[in-house]
Image: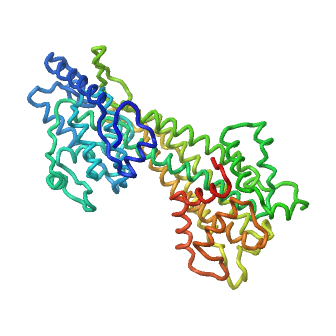
């Protein structure tokens, strides 16, 4: 059982979201919530006009709402804002949204009752997952439309996934023995004013992309051996005079993966002076992506533990402040940066694939086919990689540079951060395919160098691939085989195998 209190780590986030670890409110969180709610009750007694508590929303900020209409106001807010479209988010993203919204509200700066936060955690623990459409957020005033779909389920409206089936929310709540919530003053606004949709997408992406970055190093090391490339560019002397952390770590990974190579010894006296950039600059290119992902991880960790509501309640100071913490710009820029950083891993990978498949560059059989002409070998795999890389270039165009004013120009600059994060995830999925193709190509190329063995990390991964898919002696249907390698990448299996053989890998 994980307690939700002051700080939520990425490790805890993943444990709750993907491993279904139970979660509950910590004692101090309950105390903060009590104080925050008491402040709202005082405002209601005073009769002072406070945005979102007893006024309308957005352009209706100056419209005063009668006390006997405040519950209806909050319900109307959820119903009217739930106009998202597109396919629903996957379960892990939805669980992340529920968790992050609860974590933000548990800081006690939103004036929401403990009961409402506990209900969000109950949805997590009982695996009641609201169906949240993936499109419709502009990323300022928070993720209004998707979070409204989350909140719909709390009040017994909309749909949820429960016990493997799509249910009307009211029926699912009844089956789980829960009553729909009746929201009090400020609570509807508190539920939907936040960046938790984009943050959930980005947090999951950061966790998955760390595996991807190391897998890219493994694929590059295999390609270096397959192409009889030089190991010298990975010498610590090289990165020592330009010591960007990511480059230093990537070069170290390459050295560890390539240690003990018989292939290296076999071409130690070859006349080639330098390799193509796609081999020689692996530390600089992969390392830059590694550093970018580190920065994005820092942004995510701050956001996971932030309050993104408006207005904010500060009971100790006796103040209610309208601000802009709901604006998604930090995550929008990070999401765009993530997409660019990941796209580059595929970009350089596709060039290494071309190096291996082109006989004029590789010295290997054309398209790595044993009987070229009769068989096409891996020819079309490079076409697929090229297509995915080109698609990534379109997707990597930043969403955060766009803004369309909303709410009758009251909200005149928006982040488009959710679009940025969604695009980054699509790029990630394309990159896994490209790296899968590089690994399959490199394994085929290494077969032509037998009995020489590559470096110990490369050898272990090569053997693991061959246990999964055989050498391509003649043309056959390859997509299912590439899919197998894709799942080995996604699950971190190839990183584990390489790490066991090569020792430490960053």
Q: Residue 369: horizontal and vertical position, in percent?
A: 70, 78
Residues 245 and 158: in front is 245
In the rendered structure, the answer to whether residue 35 lies left or right of residue 253 reads left
Name which residue lies at 44% across and 38% down: 9
Q: Residue 319: horizontal and vertical position, in percent?
A: 29, 16
Q: Residue 154: horizontal and vertical position, in percent?
A: 21, 44
Name which residue lies at 75% across and 62% down: 225
Against 43, residue 472 (above or below) is below
Instruction: Answer with the quarter of the image where residue 318 lies.
Output: top left
Residues 110 and 176: in front is 176
In the rendered structure, the answer to whether residue 110 lies left or right of residue 225 reads left
| Quadrant of the frame with the N terminus | top left
Q: How many marks?
A: 0
Farthest residue to the top: give it: 317
Whether residue 94 is visible to the viewer of this picture, yes or no, is: yes
Q: Residue 428: horizontal and vertical position, in percent?
A: 52, 54
Against 111, residue 46 (above or below) is above
Name which residue lies at 69% across and 57% down: 220
């Amino acid at each position: 059982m994980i307690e939700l209190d002051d700080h939520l780590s990425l490790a805890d986030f993943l444990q709750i979201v993907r491993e279904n670890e139970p979660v509950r409110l910590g004692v101090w969180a309950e105390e903060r919530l009590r104080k925050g709610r008491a402040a709202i009750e005082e405002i209601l007694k005073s009769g002072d006009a406070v945005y979102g508590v007893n006024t309308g929303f957005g352009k209706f900020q100056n419209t005063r709402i009668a006390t006997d209409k405040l519950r209806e106001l909050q319900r109307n807010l959820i119903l009217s804002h739930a106009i998202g479209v597109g396919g629903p988010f996957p379960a892990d993203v939805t669980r992340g949204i529920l968790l992050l919204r609860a974590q933000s509200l548990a800081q006690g700066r939103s004036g929401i009752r403990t009961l409402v936060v506990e209900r969000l955690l109950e949805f997590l623990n009982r695996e009641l997952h609201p169906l949240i459409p993936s499109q419709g957020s502009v990323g300022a005033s928070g993720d209004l439309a998707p979070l409204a779909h989350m909140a719909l389920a709390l009040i017994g409206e909309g749909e949820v996934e429960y016990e493997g089936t799509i249910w009307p929310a009211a029926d699912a709540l009844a089956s789980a023995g829960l009553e729909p919530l009746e929201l009090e003053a400020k609570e509807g606004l508190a539920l939907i004013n936040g960046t938790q949709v984009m943050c959930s997408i980005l947090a999951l992406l950061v966790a998955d992309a760390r595996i991807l970055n190391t897998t890219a190093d493994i694929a590059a090391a295999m390609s270096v051996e397959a192409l009889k490339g030089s190991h010298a560019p990975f010498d610590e002397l090289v990165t020592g005079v330009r010591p960007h952390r990511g480059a230093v770590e990537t070069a170290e990974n390459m050295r560890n993966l390539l240690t003990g190579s018989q292939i290296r010894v076999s071409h130690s006296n070859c006349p080639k002076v330098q390799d193509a950039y796609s081999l020689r600059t692996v530390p600089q290119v992969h390392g830059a992506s590694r550093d970018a992902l580190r920065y994005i991880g820092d942004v995510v960790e701050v956001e996971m533990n932030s309050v993104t509501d408006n207005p904010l309640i500060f009971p100790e100071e006796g103040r209610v402040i309208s601000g802009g913490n709901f604006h998604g710009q930090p995550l929008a820029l990070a999401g765009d940066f993530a997409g660019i950083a990941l796209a580059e891993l595929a970009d350089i990978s596709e060039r290494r694939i071309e190096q291996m498949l082109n006989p004029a560059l590789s010295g290997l059989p054309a398209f790595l086919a044993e009987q070229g002409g009769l068989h096409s070998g891996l020819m079309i795999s490079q076409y697929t990689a090229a297509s995915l890389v080109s698609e990534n270039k379109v997707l990597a165009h930043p969403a955060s540079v766009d803004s369309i004013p909303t709410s009758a120009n009251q909200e005149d600059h928006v982040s488009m951060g959710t679009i940025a994060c969604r695009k980054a995830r699509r790029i990630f999925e394309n990159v896994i395919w490209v790296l899968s193709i590089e690994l399959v190509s490199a394994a085929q190329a290494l077969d032509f160098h037998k009995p020489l063995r590559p470096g110990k990390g490369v050898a272990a991964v090569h053997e693991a691939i061959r246990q999964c898919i055989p050498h391509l002696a003649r043309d056959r249907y390859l997509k299912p085989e590439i899919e197998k390698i894709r799942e080995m990448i996604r699950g971190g299996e190839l990183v584990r195998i390489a790490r066991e053989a090569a020792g430490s890998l960053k």
